[in-house]
Structures are given as C-alpha cells and as structure tokens.
Image: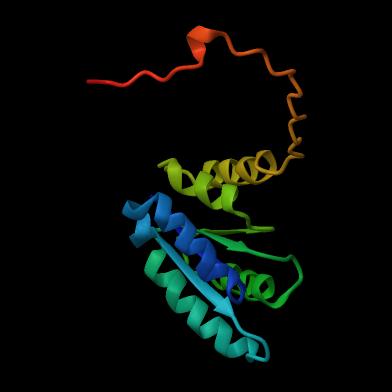
Amino acid sequence: MLGILIIAHTPLASALKAVALHTFPERAQFLEAYDVKPDMPQEDIEVCARQLLHQVRNPDALILTDVFGATPCNVAQRLAQTSEDGYQVKIIAGVNVPMVWRSLCYEDRSLDAMVARAIAGASQGVMTVGIPKPQNQAPQGVSHDQSHTYHQQ
C-alpha cells in the first residue's frame, strides 16, 4: 500500500484522517495528516510535513491537499519537487471524503493508478441529491380483522 499524506487547513486534515480510519482502521500506518494552522511560517510547515511524508512513503506517496494555490498545496509542491531520488510523490488538490476512501480501499501498486482512483472517487462522490416527494396516499378504512392486535405467546 502506498502512503498518503493529507495536508490541509486546520482541522480538515485530522478530521479526514479520523473519518478514513473509522472506515479503514487497518490502513493507519499508511495515512498521516497535517493541519496547517493560521499564521504558521511555511518553513515550519514544510519541516513537519516532510517528516510525516517520510513516515508514510512506501516507497512512493500521494499528498492530498484542500485548495490549489493555498499554503498546504504550496508546501506539498515543494515536498514533491525535493523528493529523494527514486521516490515519487504526486499531489491532488480538492480533497474530500470519497477521495480519501477510494485511495485507501484499493491496494494498487502503482501511484498513477491510485491517483486515478482518488480523482474518480472525488468526482463521483459529488452529486445533486434529490428529496423524495411525500407519498400522500389516502388512508384506507380499517376492517374489523385489522382492528385488533395479535400477541405472541
């Protein structure tokens, strides 16, 4: 199983990790989360995130971030650019629960396959949900047979 690091604005990363481990507790060793707090220096964020990435990398890793262009994504890009030789790191922005679950529920050996599954999970998990119309059926009269209760003995 490839490693996954979630880097997002606080408290999203840790919340997504908690949801993921609720469903896939056996994947805990492959998943880490880093909550980026307001006013943290990017250098400090990068040092901590790099340590977490090193923990989950097996040998490659997927980094999931919340918003493209924001600090978590910018840090993820620097981590991927300075990845050690022989290791591959891919980044997906726009993380959501279906993306995380889809990434964890398959044991693909390929980082590219995991990226494709994660993106499919994210896009297929977003949909308009209709509200069912109430069933306004006229009540039927109660016959004598239906008016009494039955008791088990």
- 94 in relation to 110, above or below: below
Q: Nearer the viewer, residue 24 or 78?
A: 24
- Residue 9, image x, y percentages: 64, 75
Q: Is residue 141 visible?
A: yes
User: Vertically, is 87 above or below 126?
Assistant: below
> From this viewpoint, which residue is outermost toward the left?
153
Left or right, 36 with reference to 123: left
Apparent side of residue 106 relative to residue 74 in the rendered image (left or right): left
Q: Is residue 85 left or right of residue 1?
A: right
Question: In percent of the image, x 65 and y 12: which residue is there?
Answer: 141
Residue 110, horizontal then vertical, whole percent? 47, 44
**Could you tell me residue 94's position as x and y percent?**
69, 58
Up-down: is 26 above or below 82?
Answer: above
Note whether residue 84 is visible. Answer: no
Residue in front for this viewpoint, 82 or 36:
36
Lateral position of residue 146 relative to residue 70, left or right: left
Query: Which residue is at a point 76% across and 24% down the rendered structure image?
Result: 136
Q: Residue at x 58, y 53 (%)?
A: 97
Q: Position of residue 30 (x, y in %)?
A: 38, 59
Q: How is the image coloured?
A: rainbow
Within the image, what quadrant is residue 64 found in? bottom right
Q: Nearer the viewer, residue 4 or 89?
A: 4
Number of numbered discs overlaid on the protein picture = 0
State the quadrant of the C terminus. Answer: top left
